[in-house]
Amino acid sequence: MAARIFDLYRKAWLRAFYPRYTIDETTRLFNERFGTSLTREQIRNAANRFKCGPGKDPQRFAPGHVPHNKGRKGHCPPGSEKGWFRKGEDPVNTRALYAERWDHAGNRDSRTPVLMIKIPGAAPYASQKRAGAHQKTRWVRKAVWIWEREHGPVPEGHAIVQLDGDPANCDPANLDCVPRSALAMLNVPWAIPPAGRELNAVRVRIAQVRAGLSMARRNGNPSGNTQTGSLLSCPDPRSTAPTPT
């Protein structure tokens, strides 16, 4: 049936007219020219089989099309300039410098909100620079900001924690810098709860022991003579135990 409908002449006609008209126009012209009653789906399938090229899209601009708003910056009705932002004007919801806010997504590990503070200075990370290259302020965690003012930058692989567990208490005496390996063990549900600076050293030490044992198990060394010992900087107690007689 397809061979009788689309002979060589009709294939040539389809290859010539299909790219120049829309699918509805091509279907109408083909049926009028050859006295057929083909549908638009049959014409499209035939054009695909005979490699007639893409058809004309009525929603696509033709080559050389000139937009109606070329050379215009936008439509500004008279009187709309009253609502424009003035140069240097801040939005009404702008927070003042050193303002504080709670970030409920800042500490996703412990699901605890983090107290943030707005400080001057551009964002230090490349992703933040791309997102707001024009900004002259940034939001940082208040506890980290206060600790760095007292002691300098946070060492690599360390984190700042509140000794009493209160995220709102950012007093310098309540802040401590702990290794992240110990921080992972401090945030588990079965960890020892915060109890002040006096017991924080013990909490961190216990967390380091648990982190070292976990690392030793992952490395297939249950005795912990190398990994755990290097992490805790102390020898394995079983290595110094007396040999039974």
Image (cartoon, rainbow, N blue to C red):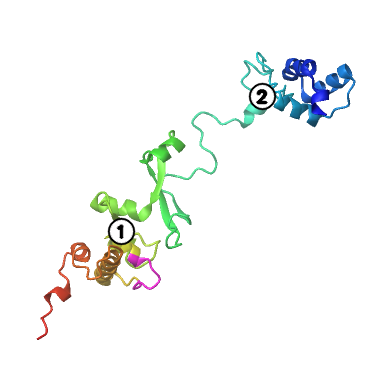
Tell me the number on the disc at residue 76: 2
| Picture residue at 35% right of the left edge, 56% below the top | 143
Q: Is the residue under label 2 in contact with that under label 1 (CB below 8 Å)? A: no
| In magenta stretch: residue 191 | yes
Q: Please, what is the dominant secondary structure of the magenta stretch? A: loop
Frontmost residue, 80 versus 114: 114
Please identify, in this view, whether the residue under mark 1 or under mark 2 is nearer the observer: 1
What span is in magenta? 185-193
Q: Residues within 10 Å of mark 2 (few under 14, many from 20)?
A: few
| Chain-order first, disc 1 or disc 2 | 2
Question: Label 1: which residue?
Answer: 180
Considering every residue shown, the one lying at the far top of the view is 64
Vertically, is 222 above or below 159? below
Count of numbered circles on the image: 2
Frontmost residue, 177 versus 28: 28
| In magenta stretch: residue 176 | no
Q: Is residue 144 left or right of residue 10?
A: left
Considering every residue shown, the one lying at the far bottom of the view is 245
Q: Is residue 234 left or right of residue 7?
A: left
| Residue type, label 1 | Arg
Q: Position of residue 102 (x, y in %)?
A: 46, 55
